[in-house]
Amino acid sequence: MKNKTFMTLGFTSIGLAIALLFSTNLFAQTQKEAEVKEASRLESLAKFTKVISIVEQYNVDDVTIEELMDKALQGMMNNLDAHSNFLTQKDFKKLKVQTDGEFGGLGITVGIRDGALTVIAPIEGTPADKAGLKSGDIILKINEQSTLNMTIDEAVSIMRGKVGTPIDITIVRKGEAKPLPIHIVRGIITIESVYTKTIGDNVLYVRVTSFDKKVVDDVTKAIKMRKVATKGIILDLRNNPGGLLDQAVGLVDLFVDEGEIVSQKGRKKADDKIYSASSRNTITDVPVIVLVNGGSASASEIVSGALQDHKRGVILGEKTFGKGSVQVILPITDKEAIKLTIARYYLPSGRTIQAVGVNPDIEVFPGEVKNHENGFSIKEADLKKHLEEELEKTQTKEKSKQNKENTELKKDIITPEMLNKDIQLKEASDIMKALIIVKG
């Protein structure tokens, strides 16, 4: 019995010794790896310092150490991804003006697609929109300055300026044989982010041009105001470049009563977040059709993708832009900062938006509905002689009143003529009629 006890104690002691030896070796290995990593880090920093010193000493142009450091930081940030950037004192100041104050600009959102500076979307009613810029246009030059290797922030900085000043942009557009020159006069950029109209008696059309802080409130008011009559909603997110994440989540929550809306995943667990729907925020269960195109980006893609994953809406139009990354502004001094991508968005199904976009359920390209009207038609009024003067006297007042009423009416409704000029909206309207019938 004593032998068995001693044997057990012996095996236990050997086990503890092996475990202790293994732990010691593991600790030593981990410590060695940390030392190697730190040595490599110091070596890389020494190499960077050496290059800076050589360039400062021998470069043909006299460049200060401050300028070299700024260039080095810009190069490093620009090579991380298309949306990360080093903000110099001048850039940081302009960013604050854009966020906090009023500024003059063109009214377009731009991004980098396949290495080229590309128009994500012109904002409705802005100088860029009126000048004819379209989603997908590639900007070759800004005031004769090439955009090759130009960052988004550099381009925005050049395009922004004093209200009333002109700017010339050269673009390449799909389907055009030659580059197109576009002349634009800068204006104050004011955006009406939400407006609504009706189609027929029971379809509510909601247009969201960008996701500012009032989107959820404005859409909620519009839906509640017409809730009794509304049997279907067409949500138009075409050429919507995005905006605030919480507004995108809130908009989806109006239609979805449970489940994940979007998740955010970064390198660190602290950057991971999941945004979910709540039944207390849901205000309607009517059928929804979402209109999207290549100018629908970021927050627009979160809304359309989430509604698609939840089978809550039919997505109609064209493939979206594909911007699904999260950027934050991190100050490094009182006057300088970096804009850094810290995470990516993922839809409820787990798919990413970044560089992929959202594919519509029903693909419809933009255009007009062609009407085949009979050009030769004779009406009774053409066959009979009318007392024109007498008719004019009695009908002038009626026509004036009717035109005024029609003008007021058209502000709130989308007429058949308007639908025929927008084939995507026309298709959405026709499909909505079917959905309403099916739902009963």
Image (tube, helix red, strand yellow):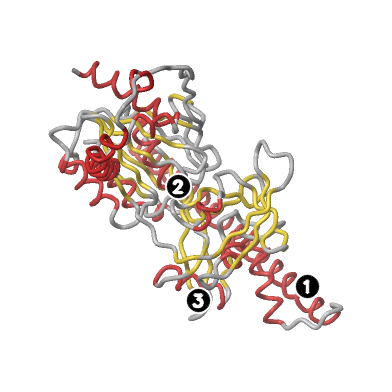
Q: Tell me the element at label 3.
A: helix
Residue 247 at x, y percent in the picture: 31, 51
Q: Is residue 427 left or right of residue 368?
A: left
Q: Which mark is residue 298?
A: 2
Label pair 2/1, CB-CB below 8 angstroms: no
Residue with the mark numbered 1 = 51
Q: Residues within 10 Å of mark 1 (few under 14, many from 20)?
A: few
Q: Hey, which quadrant is residue 143 in on the image?
A: bottom right
Instruction: Name the mark on residue 421.
Output: none
Image quadrant holding the N terminus, namely top left
Task: Of the two numbered discs 3 and 2 on the same chain, state the one appearing first in sequence.
Answer: 3
Q: Pointer 2: residues within 10 angstroms few (<14), some, or many (20+)?
A: many
Q: Residues within 10 Å of mark 3 (few under 14, many from 20)?
A: some
> Percent x, y for residue 382?
38, 22
- Gap between marks 1 and 3, in whole Å? 30 Å
Residue drawn where x is 42% and y is 68% of the image: 99
Disc 3 marks a residue whose amino acid type is Lys
Per the rendering, the mark at residue 93 is 3
Question: In 3D space, how far apart are the residues under numbered discs 3 and 2 (Cα atoms)?
Answer: 25 Å
What amino acid is at disc 1? Val
In which quadrant will I find the C terminus?
top left
In the rendered image, the vertical position of residue 73 relative to residue 194, given as above or below? below
